[in-house]
Structures are given as structure tokens and as C-alpha cells.
Amino acid sequence: MRSDSAGQHISGAERIVREHEVPAVCAALSERALAHPKGMAENTFITVEALAESDILHVPSVGVKEEAVQSPSQARDVIEELLRPMTAYSQVVIEGTFTARNMRGAMLIAADTGKRCEPDAQRGVRVSHMDAYGATEEEFKGKDAAREAIVLASKVAAHPDVLAEVCVSDDPAYTTGYVCIDDTYHRLPHIKEPGSDEGARAFMIKPGADIEALIDYLENRAVLVDFEAEQ
Ligand code: PML
Ligand code: MG
């Protein structure tokens, strides 16, 4: 599902479910687009695609580490420290993710140049076709945003050409973000001030990566994230 109002992205969500669950899941996703903190979506698009078991790649869940962060500036320091060994352009990634608004997808930033490498810089690359496998409700205690972000980060981290991900939610009410690097999801509370509509995702890309193949994986490859195989 994805939804927008006046051309601005409102929300998106992905599920991989059994056939008999499709009607209820579509209903839940359409309700979600109408009740989003960014405002009621004018347009909601729900696409249902048939998948065979053999189309689905299983990848392990990243491990989750809660960081003791108290403020946005402290969060930036943690991000800077984690990214520094991988790129001279950590500030480009940080500025990009803290100032973008209403992007449908993520920025791809080359680790060796700091330059954007996706074809449509306003839209970004929308990671799609993924869900959790074997996750108990207990593991998430109703925290949908975190659950979905860990699923997305695990799909992204499983690709060898992605070195790191930084995420600041564009939801004004959601102030926890993360950096995912070396298969660890560092959860960063207070990453932004409540009420701010800023926020986006950025993936730091390995030099020499085949960008077209990477975008095809991120957008189209069906992936189930296996929580029983957490790293
Ligand atoms: C989003 O709005 O989609 C990003 C949610 C980030 C979740 C971070 C967390 O709570 O672990
Ligand atoms: Mg969102």
C-alpha cells in the first residue's frame, strides 16, 4: 500500500501473507492510510501480487541495539561515529536524512563520492516486497513502526552493496530513528524534535555497485525476514 495527498507521500506498507488473509490485510492497510498522523490520504493505492514460495528469498533479521541517546544532536554524533569508518561523507548522509521531506523512497548515496546515485532524486528508491517471518507479537509489543523498520533494514542489509542505512522518520509524532550497519540496527530515540516533518532514509552504497541491480533487488525482490535466525 502507498498513499499520498496533493502529490506528497503520506504512508506506505508491505505485507507478504497467505491467500486467505488478503482481504483482511487490504482492509487494515486502507484504514491505516486514512488514519495517518501526517494527515488523511487523498489517494490510496493497494496492489496485490501473487507470489510462489520459490519466489521468496529468506534473510536473517538484523540484531537490535538500543542506544542511550537523549537529544537530536547526540543522535547525530552517534551516527557520525558509526559512519566515519566507511565514508568521508557522513555529514552529507546526516544532512540529507535530517532535512528531506515527504520522500516516497530512500536516497542512495555513494560512499566514495557522497553523490546521489538513484535515477529520481525527489522520489528516491522505495523498498518493497518484504515482511517478517516467524516473529512473535511479543518481540514487538505492538510497535508497528519499529517492526516494519527492522524488516526493511534487514532486507536492505542483506544486499552486499549496501554498507549502511540511516533513517529519520518523516512522521512528526515519531522521534525514534536508527542506523543499521554491520547487521546491527542501532535504535536512536530522540533523533528529532516532536512535531518536525523532516526525515528520510539514506543507504550508503559500496563503490563499484551495480546500481540498477541493487534498485531491482530493493524494489522487486520478495524477501521474508527470519526472526528465528537473528544475527
Ligand atoms: C518510518 O516512519 O517508517 C520509520 C520508523 C523508524 C522506526 C525506528 C524504531 O522505532 O526502531
Ligand atoms: Mg513513513
Image (cartoon, rainbow, N blue to C red):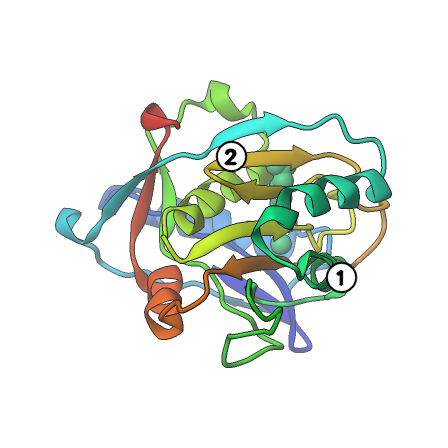
- Kind of residue at disc 2: Thr
In screen coordinates, is 17 left or right of 27?
left
Spot occupied by residue 160 in the image (x, y as percentages of width and height):
36, 53
The residue positioned 46% from the left and 37% from the top of the image is 183
Q: Depth check: 52 or 61 in front? A: 61
Above or below 10: residue 22: above
Above or below 82: residue 118: below
Q: Earlier in the sequence, mark 2 or mark 1?
A: 1
In screen coordinates, is 147 left or right of 221?
right
Above or below 13: residue 79: above
Q: Depth check: 104 or 181 in front? A: 181
The residue positioned 49% from the left and 18% from the top of the image is 138
The residue positioned 75% from the left and 25% from the top of the image is 68
**SS at circle 2:** strand
In screen coordinates, is 115 left or right of 27?
right
- Kind of residue at disc 1: Glu
- Does residue 59 appear anywhere in the picture? yes
Spot occupied by residue 50 in the image (x, y as percentages of width and height):
22, 58
Q: Which mark is residue 198?
A: none
Spot occupied by residue 42 in the image (x, y as percentages of width and height):
64, 69
The residue positioned 59% from the left and 27% from the top of the image is 65
Residue that numbered label 1 is attached to: 95
Residue that numbered label 2 is attached to: 184
State the separation of the CA atoms marked 2 and 1: 22 Å
Which image quadrant is residue 136 in?
top left
Q: Residue furthest bottom?
A: 119
